[in-house]
Amino acid sequence: FDMFVLAFVERLFRPTYRKDDFVLGKKLGEGAFGVVYRVSLMAKKPATKEGDLVLKKATEYGAVEIWMNERVRRACANSCADFIYGFLETSSKKGDEYWLIWHFEGEATLADLMQSKDFPYNVETMILGEVQDLPKGLERENRIIQTIMRQILFALDSLHSTGIVHRDIKPQNIIFSEGSRTFKIIDLGAAADLRVGINYIPKEFLLDPRYTAPEQYIMSTQTPSAPSAPVATALSPVLWQMNLPDRFDIYSTGLIFLQMAIPTLRNDSGLIQFNRQLKRCDYDLYAWRKTVEPRAGPDLRRGFELLDLDGGRGWELVTSMVRYKARQRTSAKAALALPYFDREGLLALSVMQ
Ligand code: ADP
Ligand code: MG
């Protein structure tokens, strides 16, 4: 009860908006269930601290997406794009639409950044500010990729700790926030909240086949359909332990790591070919490596070299994420504790303080 009162009061003091408050800008994306625009506020609205905004006009799943964003806003705000407001717009010619408003986080998703020939150096300048005049090389590339992975896993860990599984983790849904200079997760349209049973039944048709884990269903298909909210709240920690639904996101994140390490996997055809090969190897990454390494081109060889740095710490990370069985995959929290994320200089820093 208290939680609802708090949520209500919090919402009362936030600005509320309606359709006529927005001036539509550039279209940023269009999916099967909604259209996303960059928008700005009408001048007549009193000045707010929000500058540029993003609007998603969503169809049937908009209500769930608003619910997820409200929850993230209260429980783990920094892991996802900053959500401002959501409402039902009934006057639309196209029928009921849910309108969702976020702060405009930045121009580029990880997908955009990964398409650059300069990746990952183009990200280094964004994360660190001024370009440092260090020699380019594998070690430096690895350091940048490691920072990106740490930020993604950190955001995922807080989502998972809140009880939310995203189910559509991919570079297109990871935005670089220019304000905080970190990567944040967006697009909770396919997310499931297992603590309260919202969107409990997986909508597998929503999932992106390029990044989905082999199980397809995040919960056992024998799990009964969504129980009512109070029952789900009592049961869900048990269900979570049984099914480890968070490991679905971990598989997708492992694929993103591979794409960052190996340039040939960054485009669709490379990724699709990889998925086919991995399936043929029964999702055994070691077996896959054995089949492709002998006839690897320079890009692939360089990718393995990066993963093999420091005694194979990157390889250890990726092989603990990309596994056939969900329960053999690492959690986001455990991944962050792997040697791959050990920071040189951390010790020196703590000695100095
Ligand atoms: P969908 O994939 O359902 O079309 P998304 O929520 O992923 O919708 O948004 C589509 C695109 O809009 C993203 O890939 C991104 O380029 C852009 N975008 C979404 N949210 C933001 C945001 N908060 N700030 C900046 N750009 C955003
Ligand atoms: Mg998306």
Image (cartoon, rainbow, N blue to C red):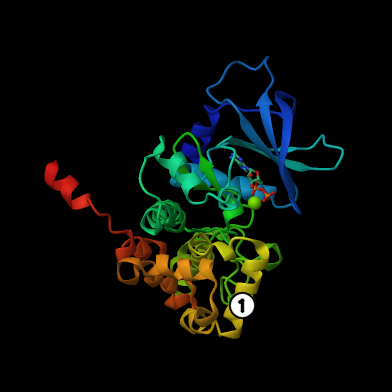
Left or right of residue 207: residue 165: left
Q: Quadrant of residue 51?
A: top right
- Badge 1 crowding class, 10 Å Cα cut-off, few under 14, some 14 to 19, many 20 or more, is few
Is residue 56 at all visible to an observer of this figure? Answer: yes
Query: Residue visible at 87% across and 38% down?
Result: 93
Residue 47, given in percent of the width and then of the height, sits at 58, 17
Left or right of residue 156: residue 274: right
Q: Which is more toward the observer, 164 or 238?
A: 164
Left or right of residue 166: residue 126: left
Query: Residue visible at 46% across and 40% down?
Result: 126
Q: Is residue 292 depicted above or below 237 in this figure?
A: below
Residue 263, given in percent of the width and then of the height, sits at 55, 62
Query: Residue visible at 56% across and 85% down?
Result: 281
**How many marks are shown on the rendered structure?**
1
Q: Which is more toward the observer, 67 or 287?
A: 287
Image quadrant for the C terminus? Answer: top left
Residue 39, given in percent of the width and then of the height, sits at 68, 30
Residue 266, given in percent of the width and then of the height, sits at 59, 61
Q: Secondary structure at mark 1?
A: loop
Which residue bears the numbered disc 1?
221
Q: Which is more toward the observer, 197 or 345?
A: 345
Mark 1 C-beta closer than 8 Å to ligand 1: no
Q: Is residue 227 depicted above or below 112 in this figure?
A: below
Looking at this rendering, what residue extends furthest in the right direction?
A: 93
Is residue 2 at all visible to an observer of this figure? Answer: no
Q: Hey, what amino acid is under mark 1?
A: Thr
Query: Residue visible at 38% across and 53% down?
Result: 140
